[in-house]
Image (cartoon, rainbow, N blue to C red):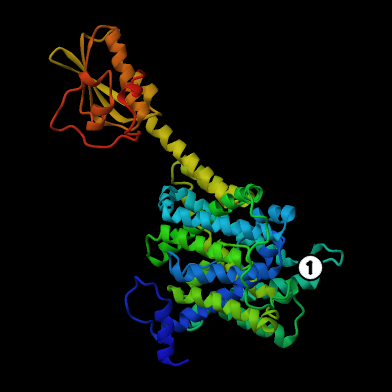
Amino acid sequence: MTRSALAAFAAAVSPTHAPAFPLSVAALRTELLSGLTVALALVPEAVAFAFVAGVHPLVGLYAAFLVGLITALIGGRPGMISGATGALAVVMVSLVASHGAEYLFAAVVLMGILQIAAGLLKLGKFIRLVPHPVMLGFVNGLAIVIGLAQLEQFRLPDGNGGHVWMTGWPLVTMLALVAATMAIIWVMPRITRAIPAPLAGIGIVAALVIGFGIEVPRVGDLASIKGGLPAFHLPTVPFSMETLKIILPYSVILAAIGLIESLLTLNLVGEITGKRGGASQECVAQGVANTVTGFFGGMGGCAMIGQSMINVTSGGRTRVAATAAALFLLSFILFASPLIEQIPLAALVGVMFMVVIGTFAWQSFRVLRKVPRVDAVVIILVTAITVATDLATAVVAGVIVSALAYAWQNAKRIHATTAEEDGAKVYRIEGPLFFGSTDGFAELFTPETDPARVIVDFDGSRVADQSALAAIEALAARYEAQGKTLVLRHLSRDCHALLNRAGQLMVDSEDDPDYGIAVDYGVKAGVLGGH
């Protein structure tokens, strides 16, 4: 390929918002070699996930190609790799078992539409609500899941439709080749960076196995990857409400899991490459990719943290590498299946084990001893749930626990100092007033023993929600029942507008705060006051 052709290819797949200059030949070579490495690692993963879902291996390979290509071209983060994933496959298996693959294709189409809607509504921005301890748990849990998935390659068919664990020399040979691959990947960057280390590991070990005729499991032992171009195919399911009732629950779960895994991977890759933003764009890209994939007989997919790590650590930083990976994968299916099927699984397992080592947040062991106990619990909880169930459940559980812990800690911060001012008792409130701290707020006051005039100063506090407003209304009622005067000061304009019974008790000050209240501004003040 000539220099001008290489430059044209780089310009064609570069993001529209990127600087208008082509990659150098050296950088483009790195991107293409990184894409080739990713494509080789995608083959056994896609085949394995297709088996998990209960569909033909080509259904997984087509998904890896289509999802990978579309997200590479229009996704929110250059360098990310998407394809068929185990997190989605485990959800799909029950739908395929009960209704068949055609219902799966329909569910994938609907899944894509839901993801497009999420992107257009800019729901991807809510991924910023995921705390750092949840991210650490996500990374660690996914690294463990990737590692455990490789153990399946150490099992052999038993001749009766089942599998047994390797023993004896087959196991020794497999382990030796895995170790050799990992050693090559570790030492290669110290020799040269012209070739991505994972690609060198795969190539050298494959050459040894093929050249010496070593008997070990190979890619072809999983299934044949030979096939044609994916063809447009309308899912052959009844177009009815009954079909919608069947596929909608699966589509919602698949869309949620796919977006959560993709957006967390987007953040992780962003930390490595120094990029930010793109969450809504990634949602739309995942949605378009899955919608198209469903119409071409693919099982759908999302971002793949393992392959993304292979890509970025191999030097893939632009859309070229991810696009090349998808095109290489298609070429394997169309033209190079006999050669690819000869690659030993041990080499690919070695690559994935190195991904596990590089992905796992080893510093979290030190962090656990230094961070607050709640954060340590969240890290361990998310890691365990990711391994035991699925990523979406783990992340949601981690966010909920973190939010509850944050609310509880802030609920305990509410307190008051008291002083005398012109014969009146002044309560200076400190700490946020919200649903979690309203009980503590009420306990600060003693209307029965307070003087005839009481001032409540909110200068050191912040009224956060409707529960806080209701607590202020209730306090005003308590002092009113005692026939005493209550004055409220340093409340925001929203509080002035929304409070009812206590409204006439507020005083205006030039230094009143200006912030919004987390309530529906259409709610009338009388509702807040219980009228």
439 vs 504, nearest the viewer:
504
At x 52% / y 51%, what residue is drawn? 137
The spot of residue 187 in percent (x, y) is 54, 77
Q: Is residue 51 left or right of residue 28?
A: right
Image quadrant in which you'd find residue 447: top left
At x 43% / y 73%, what residue is drawn? 317
Can I make out residue 4 in this image? Answer: yes
Q: Is residue 181 left or right of residue 20?
A: right
Image quadrant in which you'd find residue 515: top left
Residue 507 versus residue 105 in the image, above or below: above
The spot of residue 74 in percent (x, y) is 44, 68
- The residue under label 1 is 156
Residue 292 versus residue 23 in the image, above or below: above
What kind of residue is marked 1?
Leu
The spot of residue 141 in percent (x, y) is 57, 54
Can I make out residue 303 in this image? Answer: no
Query: In the image as oriented, which residue stretches furthest toward the right?
Result: 160
Categorize mark 1 by other alpha carbons within 10 Å: few (<14), some (14-19), many (20+): some
